[in-house]
Image (tube, rainbow, N blue to C red):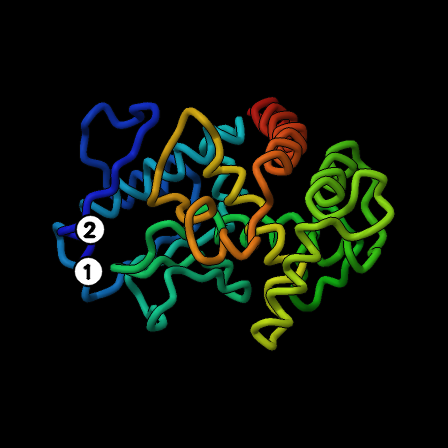
Amino acid sequence: MLKHKEYRREGPDYRFGEQVSFNDIKQTFNLNHIRIGSWVEEDEKHKAANLIFDSLADLAFILKLPPHALGLRQTLNLAFGSGGQKGVQAHYIPAHRELALAKNAGAGALAHEFWHAFDHYISSKSYHISPVGISFASHCWLADVRPIAHPLNQRLEQVFTTALLTDDGGDANDFVTRGLALDKQYGGQYFSKPTELMARAFEACIESYPDISNPYLVNETLTSSLATAGGYPDLQHRKQIFAALIGYFEPLGEAIEREK
């Protein structure tokens, strides 16, 4: 249960011991709407607000983004403890642009699901896609959809190249090959999807960031059955992917700051 569980976080103190509210989260990170389940008790709401605030603040800090950028220009919605699926920590609902966290099982999945939200949001800014339907930038990249010419979009494509291709760019790398092997093992098409590969690569880089440890934001990319099975990039590969991520997000953050 959320109210009885402790999450040992190490990192900057953003709240200085103060209790924050879900409204503080909405304003600080420029979210569009927050939906809280009717079964969430008041003390659970208070604890969750602090955990989610710190997690989003950690994410902004690691990516060198201004906090308000995480709301994806006020298009991202957040749901907590509302309509979760049994056994599912969290999920992103593209049709509603909603990142949904389960009340008692949402810990550790926020970074993974945030990538899905970003991947969805940025697709129309980085590729020439139809205004109808749902697209993800990582899938557009793999499908050779024509990119929109912009220096930042070139940097985003470098993120995909670094995460998913061999050093010479000529073939799928070992991380992708391991995803294909997992799909074969489980008889499905999930682990090798570009959207899922990138979400796992992203969360792995966040967990491997040396100065912050936050199990509510991300967990189990280092020690879990999926990690043991090769479902995440290895440590050296994470360093390369993270360098590409910062090469993209830092100038993106600077561009957003210049808009003020």
Distance of mark 1 from mark 2, alpha carbons? 6 Å
Residue 204 vertical position relative to residue 90 in the rendered view, above or below: above
Residue 200 vertical position relative to residue 87 in the rendered view, above or below: above
Q: In this orientation, which residue lies closer to the viewer: 214 or 151?
A: 214
In the rendered image, residue 24, in percent from the top left (x then y), is placed at: 30, 38
The quarter of the picture where residue 191 lies is bottom right
Circle 1: is it few (<14), some (14-19), or many (20+) Cα within 10 Å?
some
The residue tagged 2 is 45
In the rendered structure, which disc, 1 or 2, sits on the residue that comes first in sequence? 1
The quarter of the picture where residue 212 lies is top left
The residue tagged 1 is 40
In the rendered image, residue 229, in percent from the top left (x then y), is placed at: 53, 57
Circle 2: is it few (<14), some (14-19), or many (20+) Cα within 10 Å?
many
Outermost residue, front direction?
Answer: 228
Quadrant of the image containing the N terminus: bottom left
In the rendered image, residue 142, in percent from the top left (x then y), is placed at: 77, 56
| SS label for mark 2 | helix
Question: Can you tell which mark lies on residue 149?
Answer: none
All told, the count of numbered labels is: 2
Q: Are marks 1 and 2 in contact (CB under 8 Å)?
A: yes
In the rendered image, residue 226, in percent from the top left (x then y), is placed at: 49, 57
Amino acid type, residue under disc 1 in the picture: Val
What's the residue at 29%, 24% (across, down)?
Answer: 13
Does residue 18 appear left or right of residue 51 in this picture?
A: left
What's the residue at 13%, 53% (across, down)?
Answer: 42
Residue 158 vertical position relative to residue 88 in the rendered view, above or below: above
What's the residue at 67%, 33% (across, down)?
Answer: 244
Quadrant of the image containing the C terminus: top right
What's the residue at 30%, 59% (across, down)?
Answer: 105
| SS label for mark 1 | loop
Amino acid type, residue under disc 2 in the picture: Lys
